[in-house]
Image: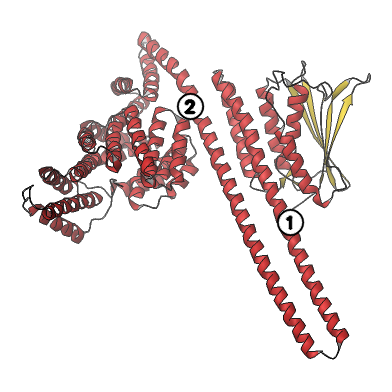
Amino acid sequence: MQRVIWFSVVSPVAFLLVMVIALTCCAQSNPPVNGTSTAVQKLRDSIDANNKSVQHLIDLRQYTEARELAILTVKRARGINYINGEGNAHLNLSSIYYAKRRFSESELEGKQALALFSNGSGRAWALIRWGQAIWARSDFHGAVTAFGKAQGIFTAMRDSSGIGASSSLLALAEEERGNYDKSFQYAIEALNFHAEEANVALGQLYADVGDYETALDFYGRIKDSSLKIQNYLKVGEVYSLKDDFEHAKYYYQSYLSTLNKTDKYDFSKPYTLLGEMYVSMGKYDTALYYLNTALTGFKQVNDNNWVMRTLLELGKTYNTLHRPKQASVYLKELLSSASQSGARQYVLEANYLLYQIEESRGNYKSAYAHLKEYTSLNKVIGITQSARKLAFFKASAQLAQAKLKIDLLNRDKQLQVEELKSVSQQRMFMLIGVLGLCLIFGVLIRNAYLKRKNADHLRQLTQNELQIEKLENTKKLAELEMQMLRTQMNPHFIFNSLNSINRFILQNNKTDAAEYLTKFSRLVRMILQNSQNTIITLEDELNALRLYLELEMLRFDNRFSYNLTIENDVDISMIKVPPLIIQPFVENAIWHGLMPKETPGLVEIVITEADNMLITKVSDDGVGRAQAVPEENNHVKNHRSYGIDLTTQRIKIMYNETPSKAPVTINDLTDTEGNPAGTEVILILPICYD
């Protein structure tokens, strides 16, 4: 895989050795093209060696020497019509120019490599080099197209390294375009191929949605030393967003220490990030020095993405310092550049700041124009931000579900190992028994009664041990079945909730969508944490239940209310129950009892304790089972109580030890005239404290 790699220390001996080899190869005179095949092959081998030497020089960040040798290699390969050698030399030149932030030249070298490679991995890497160059110039659509074609070639070749690299780039490019579902899908796909770049992509995606701890976790998983150095800036930026400026400064300085001081353009990106950090710290003079220096560097290499980011930060800083004239100059330049490249977020922020500046200067007509543009674009971006968060939660749920499946498979494998171990132990016990019998027979041959008694005793011990092992294996199997049922239940509830969030977003109801999304994220966190345990405290179960009821009330426009009563003698902080054991019955009461009802309804949950049993009563004043609305009713269409069935299975497994007691009882409620007046469910669980 061709890749620009960065190192902080250059070994003089290694460098001189590489240069001697390269110059030796270059010093050889070109034989005639019509020479022997052996001579041509030797020349091709020397060209391949030159390309490897160039890659090593790139690794050492010796770009001037690498460029000179790459240009010579292009000429030599072209002289003998060695297409593969010339194409790889152009790829090396594209990498060199990209590292030097000379994106136009990097794009040109990528195109020349594309013209030489008609298929295979060479064409795929040429597409990636070309896509990176045009991405730096804000052509996101073209970059995605190029990365997608490269991924298709790598997939056909079953090149897992190439698939991982192209999927990681697609994840970041789709995130720039606002396609967050695709972005997370590509990142997870890259992770499946164990690509180091996947950790980079997921780190940036989680940082963009504000989950800084998870972002730092993914960055910390990177083992490749070159990628670690490249991501010093990303790690520093995350710490800066967390207001941990000491750690941020440490990573920025670590990156700067790896740069060649003669390459001043390499300092632009860390200078912008340092400027942003000093703005957050209130050190505006220092920030302006770094930002203005960075802007000059970015403009000289035509790095439009970072030009826009630096212009925005300069505009904000001058506006904070009450210097509207300078702020306006930078913001108008930003607005022009962002409008041309389609960077909507920059257009939005530039319009809002210009509206504030123009209003403070009394230019109300201009201020109104900027405010109008900001308001129009903010509606679109507001929906886009909600879509980003929704994609984030979907991906988090997929990752958590995948982890649970892996854990279950590992437990199955562990159970098989234990079963094999049990068989081995049985054989050993049988061998010991036989040896024991032989020993007793030899010593006590004259006493038949004692021999028989000892034999019976040993046989009984063996049977008891086998019975104990069988019971232990049965108990472990039951625990695995319980975990599998919990794994099936969690996605059921998450699916229903995500549908509700999607409806709010489609209705452009941003207030309710934001409120629902905040509560839902808390509930998802509770469910994912609780699902890791076989049992949780009753207090945690009730907290999750309250949050679920509040979500359902918001979802159905408060068409029902609820009462939760806990008797004084019930210690909810100590009593343990399986997670999500009450919620399915409450959900059933809402959907099948209250939703068909035309008037507001009520759900009552009462928690009591009797005879060392925990009794939970869930009752509603709905239509009752006898009057339940059929499947065609609009409120309950396509809704089935998978949760009730799964919960009943969980309770049956748990009640294997006390089969005489009925765990769930359902009663139909009636009024004084005998008409249906709701349903009552009584759930009885044994009290457990550990």
What amino acid type is highlighted by mark number 1? Thr
Q: Is residue 604 left or right of residue 305?
A: right
Return the residue at label 2.
385
Of 684 and 369, nearer the camera is 684
What amino acid type is highlighted by mark number 2? Gln
Q: Secondary structure at mark 2?
A: helix
Residue 502 occupies which quadrant of the picture?
Answer: top right
Residue 635 appears in the figure: yes
- Position of 363 relative to 200 (above/below): above
How many badges with numbers are in the image? 2
Outermost residue, right direction?
Answer: 673
| Residue 156: percent from left, percent from top | 37, 40
Q: In percent of the image, x 36 and y 41: which residue is there?
A: 154
Return the residue at label 1.
474
Decide which of tag 1 and tag 2 comes sooner along the chain: 2
| Residue 432: percent from left, percent from top | 71, 78
Residue 12 occupies which quadrant of the picture?
Answer: bottom left
Q: In percent of the image, x 77 and y 48: which residue is there?
A: 654
